[in-house]
Amino acid sequence: MNRSEAELRSIARSLLEKGVVELVIGYESSGKSVRPFFASRPEEAERLVWNPECWFNLARYLRAFKGRRVAIVAKGCDGRSVVELVKENQVDKGSVVVIAVECNGVFKPAKYGSSGSARRVADYCERCTTRVSPVADYLVRSDNQGSLKRTSGSGEFSKDWLSMFQRCLKCMACVKSCPFCYCTECSIEGFKPELVHRLRDTRELFTFHLTRALHMAGRCVECGACESACPVEIPLTRLYHELNEWFREKYSYIPGRSFEEPPPPLVFKEAGEG
Amino acid sequence: MSRMLFISEEGLKLLLEELVSSKTVIAPVEADGYFDFKTLRHAGEASLNYSNTRLPPKRFFLPQREVVFKHGPGAGFSQEPGYGFEAVLFGVRPCDASALSILDSILLKPPNPDPFYESRRRSITVVSLSCTRPMEECFCNVFETGPIRGSGEDLTLTRIGGGFLVEARSSKGWVLVNGFESLFRNADVEHMQEYSELSRRLTEEMGSRVKAVKERLVRLEETLDEGFFQQAAQRCVECSLCSFACPVCYCFDTEDYFEKNCYFRAKGWDTCLSQSFTRMASGLDPRASRVDRFCHRFCHKLSRIPLAFNAYGCVGCGRCVSLCPAGIDIREVLRRWG
């Protein structure tokens, strides 16, 4: 156990002991990797871990606990999700205690049957500018002072989205891992009307992915959970990053940066509309 | 065990080349650090140095989406025949091949076998390649679906020094062997010694992982530990990844649509973890909560399929364990109830 992990555990334990929260949402070890963990008893705080395997965005679970007092272990991007979700009325600001952990980037999970063994920081983390959550009730500093390598621009990558989408299994792991996909019925699941015919052909996949991309523009915090959850490695975060860049140029808005800035779609006025 | 044959490394290369020139050959191909089944353009594309393919070969028998019939003015009513192309599926791991024999007992059960699945099973020859390096998440030994020998394959290859041991497991397997007789010879004593040595090593290596006791597992539904399942279900994000990546999961949905003056009915993968799968047309949902659906998946695989078909609905390939974004692990259920 490292120092930051010890600090995290003691914060969680005391929150549970004092009854400040009924649950701490964090990560626990699952052998080779880590997985989400809900600590509800003080002694369970000892199971919490914090390391570069913690790629999942725990803010995704907050909507299930709306109105209840919970604490969340939050990386920079997770914290930004909390801010954005509060602004979208999905999370009550007062009921969430944020235990911010300083993040130097996470690894993409090693998937089944992968031939490469070298682990490296996910490329979406290289684009990250928020190592610490903008909202924090507690702050756990990182053990090592490693810095994030930032790449300027998007670098070289294939933009052949159609062929990448053709790999898509429609397993919904991207949607279901995303803190911002809280629609009670997704466009791909809906039957009345059927917006996307799931069983028709690949054109429908394009409809689904573009619908999702447009919904993510100016909201996505680029945590990369969708991309890491994807079994066929579609680099979704790259797509949302480009949309976010466009959104930032147009509205100077960065999702999850602060509580004060209202999301542009909520205050948007057409020309001449007062 | 039937008569064992031997084919040299060189011989296998020739065999693949011959096959590729005469029919469709589907084999694991490496791309971006992963292995996926692809139709070979030339024999050299195939990779034999893989632990397992990222996704199972299920889709060649149960495609993610297929039209089952169409009808419309002028077009009449026509049942789309499955695509019955002759193909060789090469390099399937024994666990994934065993999944096919489980699917056979479910989908080919009289009196109403699935004609689409049946035609594909008939026309595709499955050649398996034994595992010699099981991954950390593998537990095929539990269900006796590997690592060396499964149950749904037509031909089983096992890599030993200098080549491969070959066992024909079905008439389709014998057809393939007989078509290229000159490449095969009878295995000798040293080959068999090496085979049993490999088998012993793998049994030892995988022996202590998890176990499955049928008498206990078939009672899983009555003995469900609510707490355990509730905790795990709390993590579940309800995507369909585990089902879609599973070589055995076969639940499907149908959809009707209208295109080019014709009505189509398509059939495709669905998952029991999704509410839209369990909810009925009337609105009634027999498994309305996530915990219900979550328990159902494990009960179906480990208790109901064994009761009805005398085989587990899991082959221990470990894909769901490795891919689940929430770290849900079927081995934990086996450790508790197995």
Image (cartoon, coloured by chain):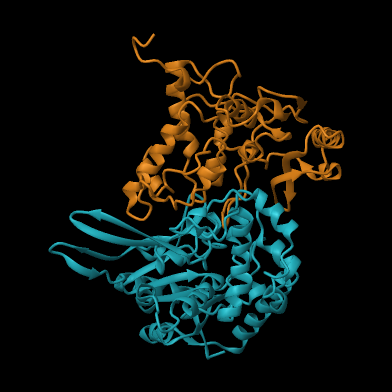
Q: Quadrant of the N terminus of chain B?
A: bottom right
Q: Which hue is chain A drawn in?
A: orange
* Residue B282, horizontal then vertical, whole percent: 45, 58
Q: Nearer the viewer, residue B119 or B136?
A: B119
* Residue B110, horizontal then vertical, whole percent: 43, 84
Q: Nearer the viewer, residue B293 or B82?
A: B293
Is B170 placed left or right of B74 in the picture? right
Can residue B184 be seen by looking at this rendering? yes
Q: Is residue A244 above or below residue A169?
A: above
Q: Quadrant of residue B192?
A: bottom right
* Residue B14, horizontal then vertical, whole percent: 39, 74
Residue at 60%, 19% in the rendered image: A258
Q: Quadrant of residue B201?
A: bottom right
The tally of labels here is 0
Q: Which hue is chain B drawn in?
A: cyan
Residue at 67%, 42% in the rendered image: A53
* Residue A143, horizontal then vertical, whole percent: 78, 31
Q: Quadrant of the C terminus of chain B?
A: bottom right
Is A188 placed left or right of B215 in the picture? left
Residue at the limit of the structure toward the left, as seen here: B74
Q: Is residue A110 above or below residue A54?
A: below
Q: Nearer the viewer, residue A61 or B147?
A: A61
Q: Nearer the viewer, residue B11 or A182?
A: A182
Can residue B209 be seen by looking at this rendering? no
Is B37 placed left or right of B150 in the picture? left
